[in-house]
Image (cartoon, rainbow, N blue to C red):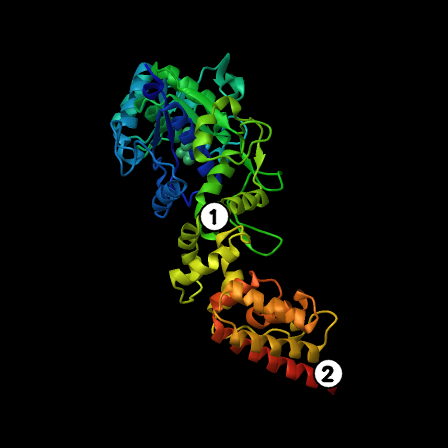
Amino acid sequence: MDAADTVRVRFAPSPTGLLHVGGLRTALFNWLFARHCGGRFILRIEDTDRKRYDPRALPDLLESLRWLGLDWDEGPEVGGDYGPYFQSQRIHLYQEYARQLVESGAAYYCFCAPERQGADDARPESRRGAATGYDRRCRWIDPHLAAERVAIGEAAVIRLKMPLEGHTTFHDLIRGDITVENSTQDDVVLLKSDGYPTYHLANVVDDHLMRISHILRADEWIATAPRHVQLYKAFGWQMPAIAHLPVVLDPSGKGKMSKRKKIAPDGRALPVHVRDFREAGYLPEAMFNYLALIGWRYDAHTELMTRQEIIERFTIERINPTAAAFDYQKLDYFNGVYIRQLSVDDLTDRLLPFVQRKGWQVEHETLRRIVPLIQERIERLDQVTEWVDFFFVEQLPDYDAQLLIPKQADAAATRHRLQRAREVLAQVEPFTHDAIEHALRTLAGQLGVKTGQLFQPVRVAVCARTVAPPLFGSLEVLGRERVLQRIDQALAKLSGASQQAAQ
Ligand code: GLU
């Protein structure tokens, strides 16, 4: 058998909210492993927890995976030989398998009130520590008696009989052998009294029926592995190979990356959901490369890699077991690199929605002329608006007239320079980058001032600030009429400023 037949991995999210960046990293590692091996990547929706079901989750999930380019070979919308791929459509299977375990003596009915049972909630956050404390009272009920009670309609859950002594060992592909004492494990609930399976049962049954070969899952699930080992044993099935991926930590490196947004020093909300990364203007190419490096590395220095290179180099041996912090600055840097690699047309297409969502009327062609002016200057697509606003607003925002005045000059000298610039710009033909540059440099020479001493007032007059995209290209795109009009406004401002100074 070749790898294409043997490697089958899955991403198995529960649709309980918007996809978190940590979840996307888990999906990416599974996808990379499948693509590296020529295996199959399966998407399975673990939607049996009806209380936590969020209808926004599935569309968000599919969109997020597609955005990153993680195509699935089997799953929602694509089908496959091992479906259905929604656990809510497989409930009868779990019921059957749970009953089978009761019949074989590996599981038992438990009639205890929920308070006595301890939490049957599989979420890792509600399972800190070892056992939930259920005292196994029903484990000792005669199975025939228990079956009769169920037959007459008494509510019951089904629990797995964990061995009471000895230990359970499993091999984690990243962490090596892990052993736990069975006495620390409880008799986990497999099927709830409403007939719905818990995570443990549904996950194990499906991994088996879907012929999953490798489980790569978040390391928060590590504590559940010994129960799953026992569950596979109870069924007499071979357990897939398993690896627990290192957790994604907060930028501070102190705790797990939370689902709440954080605020950056500059006041912007830092994204944590994939959708928010998309909306902030991170490119999927940069995200793909950056996320691949959270817990995996090729060698000590190679970081920027193409998608194809990462696929070729991705092996489980190179995954690091220790947790890794999410570094927004590094992601921004990566994003800037990938932005600079885009063609002008491609970047224009991607920037257009960001500019349009400001409500500005922007033609693709106009933006296309601006893009080369800012391509080097942005690290996220959403930053475009700060750089290009002056191209699209009718009226510049009010600015301080002092910004027009270079150091070592006063309002009168600045007025003079701007007046001369206006004359030159009214005449220059054609009104293009090179001709404008030549005309303004010549003027600076004639005025006997350094170029900056002339360019600053012109820049502020047309952009309303001192830091802006390159001047000559900006003037060309703005067009003569608007440039002259803005210089007139600046001159009027300076008259006000010199009058104030004279008083
Ligand atoms: N449904 C689980 C989750 O959302 C799947 C965990 C696993 O991969 O086994 O995390």
Circle 1 is placed at which residue position? 277
| Disc on the earlier residue, 1 or 2 | 1
Taking the image as shown, residue 66 lies to the left or right of residue 185, namely left
Instruction: Look at 52% across and 76% down and name the residue there.
Output: 427
Residue at the image position 56 percent from the left and 68 percent from the top: 463
User: Closest to the observer: 384 or 365?
Assistant: 365
Q: Position of residue 476 (x, y in %)?
A: 49, 66
Where's residue 407, x and y in %?
73, 69
Q: Quadrant of residue 202?
A: top left
Q: Quadrant of residue 297?
A: top right
Q: Please state which of residues 377 and 188 is positioned toward the viewer in this rendering.
A: 377
Which quarter of the image is occupied by the N terminus?
top left
Q: State whether residue 228 is above or below residue 389.
A: above
In the picture, which quadrant includes the C terminus? bottom right
Left or right placement of residue 491 versus residue 157 in this view? right
Type of amino acid at the residue the image marks with label 2: Ala
Q: Residue furthest bottom?
A: 503
Question: Relative to 339, does residue 321 appear above or below in the rendering?
Answer: above
Task: Tell me if I can see residue 314 in this picture.
Answer: no
CB atoms at circles 1 and 2 under 8 Å apart?
A: no
Q: Is residue 375 visible?
A: yes
- Quarter of the rendered image showing ligand 1: top left
Note whether 418 is above or below 62 in the view shown: below
Where is mark 2, residue-wise?
Answer: 501
Return the x and y of residue 5 as percentages of the image width and height. Answer: 32, 19
Residue 328 appears in which quarter of the rendering? Answer: top right
Residue 480, position in %: x, y?
A: 49, 73
Q: Please rate how many residues cluster around mark 2, counting C-alpha atoms within 10 Å: few if below 14, some from 14 to 19, many from 20.
A: few
In front: label 1 or label 2: 2
Q: Residue at x 56, y 75 (%)?
A: 424
Q: CA distance from mark 1 to mark 2?
A: 49 Å
